[in-house]
Image (spheres, rainbow, N blue to C red):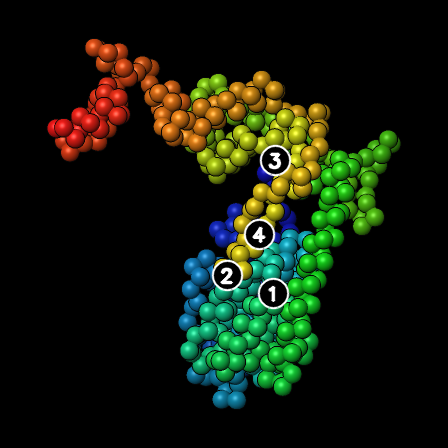
Amino acid sequence: MTFQNKNPKSPSRYPSITGLPSDGALRELAKTYLDEQHRHFPEYQKLGLLPESDDASYEDMANRFATTYRSGNHQSFPQTSRLPKEVKLGAAYVRYSDSNSNTRSLDQQLINVLTTAKRHNVFIPWTCVFADAAITATTTERPGYQLLRSLVSSPEKDPEIVIVDELDRLHRDQEESIRFGKIVQGRQRQLVTFDGFDSTNASSKLTQTVSALQSEMYIDQLKVKVNRGMTDAFRNGKPVGMPPAGYKLEPNRTLDGKLIFNRKGKLVRDIEIDEAESELVQRIFKLYAYEKLSPARIARLLDKEKALGRTTWSASSVSQMLKNEKYIGRWVWKKTSRVLDPITGKSRAATNPTEQQLVKEFPDLRIISEELWDAARQREKNTSRSTRPNGGSIDNRRVAYPNMLFDLRCVHCDRPLQRYRSVQGNTSSCIAPTERTAYAAAT
């Protein structure tokens, strides 16, 4: 099932990297930048520091932003020798946390940042505007932030000032906030926010520490509230998160056909089986369980057919589908949780203890029969090395993945011929592995 996010500030529909704003969002951000900079520095276009405000400029700026974001390498500063000597060079950072954020969030923040820059007599080139879309500030694994951090850490003189809308746009982690503050101080730069923070003030360390601690505590409290609400929704049979392929979300209606909205004004939707997609799910299970195709071969087949309008099928996505218990009407909540590595700042999925997991049966949402599910589990067991004695082959790999019409066998002992590597090259043999080792040692 495919979903097109129509939020212009959400990540691209087919993003090359997480956090990259959509093409339309980048063009809009470029337009906002030029409109504001032309208003603050109307003479800079004649100096060659600002391009003309037109569609060609927006497109070019968006492309350059995306190229830098994908590569992770910051572009060199533009020629600024024509800048007045009293004007400083700065850098900007804008961010929003998820796709439910205000669609004008990046632009609104950039307007505040450029206004603050003008107040401090600072010019921010487009190459020094950094942004992240739909990434929380609790992690440092934000490409836009990493570009800014790398630039601030460099021994170069510029940028002299880093400007953000609010401190929590930059950090929601206390340790990283303190570390970034030390980098700014060590490189003799200045961190300024639209709401009045200035790292050159005597109390800035205390202010920054308290702000980061408050943000961290806010996130912890928010996680508890969100988890409580989603757990209650799951227990009451309401959809939690997007359903997998084979299902769809349909608007909930009253008996007279009117749409139902919750107290926040959002449309209430229920999970239902998508007939067309459910047939594809059943076919994938049958290809794996009965026709003995591997997940990789199934993925290649689906790509060739452009199943569900996709050409991004992979062995891992097919394997995950084959193990998804939702297809037998068994929905599990709190099966895994995200664990943050304090050293690397990366998060990973960890399986929760069984007693913490919530299970709810939905027989009306079952797509795969018990017989087909058991056949897929048996096939998985037969092809898994962890279930074989001594981790070896069950007999011959073609038993698990048959791709030939017949097996080659020894004319004398009727054993399957096995290929192995020797000093003479690839050789076929019917000798048992333990006997083969002794034979090789003797010869």
From the top left corner, tell me how far across and down residue 146 is, in percent.
Answer: 49, 64
| Kind of residue at disc 4 | Val
Residue at screen point 66% across, 77% down: 207
Q: Quadrant of the N terminus?
A: top right
Residue at screen point 26% across, 25% down: 434
Mark 2 / mark 3, whichever is N-terminal? 3
Disc 3 and disc 4: Cα gap in Å?
23 Å
Disc 2 and disc 4: Cα gap in Å?
12 Å
Q: Nearer the viewer, residue 85 or 120?
A: 120
Mark 2 / mark 1, whichever is N-terminal? 1
| Kind of residue at disc 1 | Asp
Residue picked out by circle 3: 244
Disc 3 and disc 1: Cα gap in Å?
33 Å
Disc 2 and disc 1: Cα gap in Å?
13 Å
Q: Residues within 10 Å of mark 2 (few under 14, many from 20)?
A: few
Please tell me whether mark 4 sits on a helix, a strand or a loop.
Answer: strand
Mark 3 or 1, which is nearer the eye?
1
From the top left corner, tell me how far across and down residue 107 is, in percent.
Answer: 63, 65
Residue picked out by circle 2: 343
Residue picked out by circle 4: 339
Q: Quadrant of the C terminus?
A: top left
Please tell me whether mark 2 sits on a helix, a strand or a loop.
Answer: loop
Q: Are marks 2 and 3 in contact (CB under 8 Å)?
A: no
Image vertical order of residue 421 relative to residue 206, above or below: above
Q: Is residue 253 left or right of residue 197?
A: right
Residue picked out by circle 1: 173
| Kind of residue at disc 3 | Pro
Residue at screen point 17% across, 25% down: 439
Q: Quadrant of residue 29?
A: bottom right
Please tell me whether mark 3 sits on a helix, a strand or a loop.
Answer: loop
